[in-house]
Image (cartoon, grey):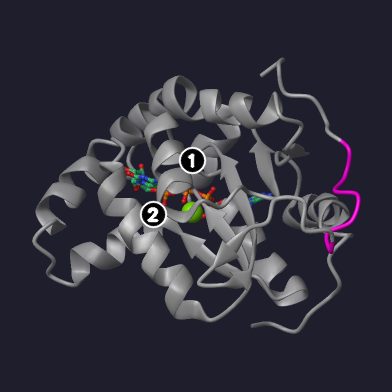
């Protein structure tokens, strides 16, 4: 995507430029975006180990909601199978509760906001602005290869749904990345490389944050 440019690093993560609070506690939120299979979950696990963030994957929260027997379970399951984006009111409720329950003050929010509706819902409900957006850029060929080799039993890791997810990503999620890019908040990472190399690049974007034990 040509409109996304490398932005400067956060000058000083200890400066509270945004004034973000969750229940009176100052918090830092980083959104982690990228196409399906770009490696968001893999890299978030590494970031958690080094920088003490709590990793909240919107997709994982939605899958847990299906398993919980929630009244929204069938609807969520159908949306995921079709590669569609679940209504924001459902996802924001799960995310907000998980943030409040965690007790941490650093959050990696993975796979959210996925569209403009998600973004507006997060802003309206939490009043929190992300510190920055980590954006994993990867070719569709490579992402498709990774997803077809993931073998985690996900309903949406089949070629028909993968193609639908790619389309939704381009049409609905890229505009969100562009929104944050126009505000200088996007940290673009070449995610087509081996996992360790990608993490080295990720570490550069987290350098303003002190190393902190896993939360
Ligand atoms: N840099 C990489 N090189 C090769 N394989 C990778 C790399 N990063 C992740 N993988 C593998 O690709 C698959 C998808 O990775 P991961 O689950 O982290 O992606 P994701 O962006 O979270 O995907 P989704 O949006 O579907 O949740 C996994 O099997 C993972 O082990
Ligand atoms: N904000 C979101 C995030 C995810 N979904 C649905 O879950 C599917 C899987 O998401 P992953 O991040 O785990 O790949 C996704 O394709 C959507 O159907 C959502 O609706 N809203
Ligand atoms: Mg994931």
Image point (71%, 66%), residue name: 47
Q: Is the CB of the residue bearing disc 2 within 8 angstroms of ligand 2?
A: yes
| Magenta residues, start to end | 8-14
Mark identifier at residue 154: none
Image point (83%, 65%), residue name: 209
The residue to which callout 2 is attached is 59
Q: How far across and down, in percent of the image, does residue 57 sit?
A: 47, 59
Q: How far across and down, in percent of the image, does residue 138 sit?
A: 65, 34
Above/below status of 144 relative to 45: above
Farthest residue, direction top = 2
The residue to which callout 1 is attached is 36
Q: For the residues carrying marks 1 and 2, which lies nearer the camera in this image?
A: 2
Where on the picture, by quarter, is residue 161?
A: top left
Is 172 one of the magenta-colored residues? no
Q: Secondary structure at mark 1?
A: loop
Asked if residue 16 lies left or right of residue 20, the reply is: right
Image point (53%, 81%), residue name: 103
Decide: few, some or many residues near mark 1? Use Cα within 10 Å; few <14, some 14-19, many ≥20. many
Q: Nearer the viewer, residue 10 or 142?
A: 10
Image point (60%, 30%), residue name: 177
Query: Does residue 27 appear anywhere in the picture?
Result: yes
């Amino acid at each position: 995507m040509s409109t996304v440019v490398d932005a400067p690093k956060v000058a000083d993560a200890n400066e509270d430029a945004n004034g973000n609070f969750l229940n009176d506690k100052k918090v830092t939120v980083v959104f982690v975006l990228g196409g399906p299979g770009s490696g968001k979950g893999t890299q978030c696990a590494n970031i958690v180990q080094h920088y003490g963030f709590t990793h909240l994957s919107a997709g994982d929260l939605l899958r847990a909601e299906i398993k919980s027997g929630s009244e929204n379970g069938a609807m969520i399951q159908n949306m995921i199978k079709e590669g569609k984006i679940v209504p924001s009111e459902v996802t924001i409720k799960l995310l907000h509760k998980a943030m409040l329950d965690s007790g941490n003050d650093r959050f990696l929010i993975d796979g959210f906001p996925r569209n403009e509706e998600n973004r507006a819902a997060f802003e309206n409900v939490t009043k929190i602005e992300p510190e920055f957006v980590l954006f994993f850029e990867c070719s569709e060929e490579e992402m498709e290869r990774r997803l077809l080799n993931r073998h985690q039993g996900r309903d949406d890791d089949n070629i028909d749904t993968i193609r639908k997810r790619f389309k939704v990503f381009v049409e609905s999620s890229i505009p969100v990345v562009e929104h944050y890019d126009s505000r200088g908040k996007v940290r673009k990472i070449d995610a087509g490389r081996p996992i360790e190399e990608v993490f080295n690049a990720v570490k550069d974007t987290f350098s303003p944050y002190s190393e902190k034990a896993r939360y």
